[in-house]
Amino acid sequence: MAQRRTPFGDRARYWFDSTLARGAAALVGWMALLSLAVVVPASAVMVWTDPDAPPSLGERLAEVWRLTGETLRLGGATGTPLRAMMSVLLALVTLLYVSTLVGLITTALTERITSLRRGRSTVLEQGHAVVLGWSEQVFTVVSELVAANVNQRGAAVVVLADRDKTVMEESLATKVGSFGGTRLICRSGPTTDPAVLPLTSPATAGVVLVLPPDEPHADAEVVKTLLALRAALAGAEPRPPVVAAVRDDRYRLAACLAAGPDGVVLESDTVTARLIVQAARRPGISLVHQELLDFAGDEFYLISEPALTGRPFGEVLLSYSTTSVVGLMRGGTPLLNPPPTTPVAPDDLLVVITGDDDTARLDDCAESVEKAAVASRPPTPAPAERILLLGWNRRAPLVVDQLHRRARPGSAVDVVAEPGEATIREISEAEADSGNGENGRNGGNGLSLALHHGDITRPETLRRLDVHSYDSVIVLGRDPAPGQPPDDPDNRTLVTLLLLRQLEEATGRELPVVTELIDDRNRALAPIGPGADVIISGKLIGLLMSQISQNRHLAAVFEELFSAEGAGVRLRPATDYLLPGSTTSFATVVAAARRRGECAIGYRGHADASTRPHYGVRINPPKRERRRWTAEDEVVVIGTD
């Protein structure tokens, strides 16, 4: 078979590539030849076209050599060959020295810039906030810290996570927006390494917040980070207060021990489960909590008021016109919604909700109470309830437990989940009483619990359920599977909500849906009706951590507020307090709530329940403010069930 002839151009290109592959020496040689091939002819043209060029050929060639040497920095000395060679040698030595020096300077600058871009330099700040870890909560925490520092000069927030510094800065800038006067500083590195934590200067920080990551073993990571922080702060006095969060209460004791006596550790899953159950019984409660916990509106403060010493707590409720009193702090122990006859002791602090710590001014509003508008009938007792729980995740047993604790006789909970997601054993373990059965079981307090298998993202599964017969529908997202690539955790939840919304539109009947979402950005995508409620599981914990980071003494208040048995935030029908259709002041609502042993702190107007951004929720309105109260309005109180 005849051999095919390779074109000359291809052979020349192959030979050229082969010589380049030999290394730096071949590359330098080719560059020298290329430079000479351009510089020598150009120098010759310049000499031969010069009117003052020397007449002899030898002198002209010497002039060409001189121009070539000056152009290539090769000395260009003329004379004997030895002299010319020494000139070239000196020029090469000079070129090697200068190029090496430039290379060293360039390399050092590049390494320094790369180090800065990687976030490996130590922060030199005082009183700054340090955030350790990365999760969806980081955006809420940083946003709230920025809002809290809006009136402070030189405030800084330092974020340390095992991520690229540039990526963190871009993500925070996109989701948080403007940082105002607060400087955001990101550093890269593992939060569990005591040698890396000093990059954030935790010893001089005002507070350190430890976030649980999104990985399955998040709680163990939090404990390890707290231990690393304790090692990094060894010998430092005073130590900054630490605020951390874990998911499982089994890790809370270990986290508290690692955080130290000044540390505060929150249980995110337990708090989220309680809020889900509260929202299932009274949709809209999550909006109230968000209004109370973010720094954009009124929030909790502890104030001292010597002028009220000795007066009963019931009178204190109407002693401020633009501040809501909700309890007392006595010896470090919060007394939320104490009996109205409780006297204010000399060392007591008032737990109030107000715009700022200097906006609580005494102004008696008792004369604004209109007793004729107060409802005299007793509150309607809560009936038995039927709740449909769609989906199963690690918080589902906690939700079932909370439903079991406050179940009315005759109540029922139906769980729908795929085989393998939930078992009757898991549901049984969530309850206090023992018992079993494949189709359901009855708790000792009359709560009927049943498990049904089905895919909640399929229309036929939901059509088989008489969803309109339930008092509330709870939709839970699926936990990410270990070892699987992380998908959007809200994808299945949004599909289920879309199917429920289609059932609403087909029947014309509104479903009281309570949805748990992970990503706050998906709230705008959720196809829900006006009577639905959305719980952003990570956002609530982020808000709590931010509030406690600014005043750690509020940790005990929030512990009581979100406990299973303590006084918490409740939404009640306005008709339990006022005659429907009456026009009266909010002071009248406060007085009516006081008769029931509650502290009224706001309301939700039905007319604005679908209007963003507050959806009708008004916290701490002026007590002299008058409005017309309808039967569909709701009153926000601090009380017990």
Image (cartoon, grey):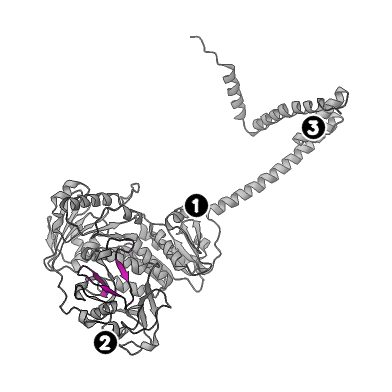
Q: Are marks 2 and 3 in contact (CB under 8 Å)?
A: no
| Residue 250 picture location, percent across and down | 31, 64
The mark closer to the camera, 2 or 1, is: 2
x%, y% of residue 548? 39, 70
Q: Which residue is farthest right? A: 55
- Residue 258 visible to the viewer: no
Q: Is residue 320 left or right of residue 159?
A: left
Is 521 displayed left or right of 193 in the figure? left
Residue at 19% x, 47% y is: 459
Label annotation for residue 341:
2
**Mark 3: amino acid:** Leu
Task: Please tell me the numbered disc located at residue 166.
Answer: 1
Q: Amino acid at mark 2?
A: Thr
What crowding class fits label 2: few (fewer than 14 Cα within 10 Å), some (14-19), or many (20 or more)? few
- Residue behind mark 3: 67
Point out the tag, 2 or 1, that comes first from the N-terminus. Answer: 1
How far apart marks 2 and 1 lie (CA) works out to 58 Å
Q: Earlier in the sequence, mark 2 or mark 3?
A: 3
Q: Which residues are magenta?
A: 611-639
Callout 1 amino acid: Thr
Image quadrant in which you'd find residue 16: top right
Please state which of residues 612 and 214 is positioned toward the viewer in this rendering.
612
